[in-house]
Amino acid sequence: MGATLPEIKTKGWLALVKELGYAGATKFILLYETGQGDYTKERKELFKDITIEEIIKEIKAAKKG
């Protein structure tokens, strides 16, 4: 049997990260992912009650744990 679609997706992502790094792999994926909706409007709603300092604190905490 061959690999499942989730396995292929994971292996493909890891290969991209290995060759391009996380930023490069993300940029590559975005070339093919068109997305949907209006992120600018959604972002304002998502982050209306949080400061940049709180976001940074959460990122640092997530990296530690």
Image (cartoon, grey):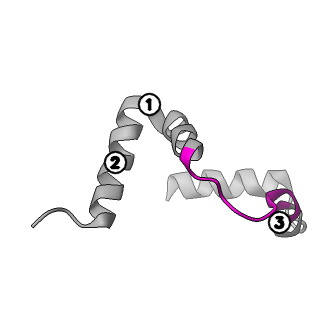
Can you give x and y, in whole percent of width and height, for residue 65 in the image?
49, 59
- Magenta-drawn stretch contains 65: no
Q: Is residue 64 left or right of residue 9?
A: right
At label 3, which amino acid type do we have? Glu
User: Foreground: 21 or 60?
Assistant: 21
Mark 2 vs 1, N-terminal side:
2
Which quadrant is the N terminus positioned in? bottom left
Q: Which residues are magenta?
A: 32-43
Q: Left or right: 31 with respect to 15?
A: right
- At label 2, the amino acid type is Gly
* Residue 40 relative to residue 13: left or right: right
Q: Secondary structure at mark 1?
A: helix
Please give the residue where the numbered disc 3 appears in the rendered image: 42
Structural crowding at the residue carrying mark 1, measured as other residues with C-alpha within 10 Å and reported as few (<14), some (14–19) or many (≥20): some
Residue 57 placement (x, y as % from top left): 71, 54
Instruction: Please tell me which of labels 2 and 3 falls first in the chain.
Output: 2
In which image quadrant can residue 39 be found? bottom right
Q: Which residue is mark 1?
A: 20
* Residue 19 placement (x, y as % from top left): 37, 30
- Circles 1 and 3: CB distance less than 8 Å? no
Compared with residue 13, is residue 62 higher up or lower down, i.e. above or below?
Answer: below
**Residue ID at (78%, 58%):** 54
Q: Using the numbered discs, state the Cα–Cα distance from disc 2 to disc 3 in whole angstroms.
A: 29 Å
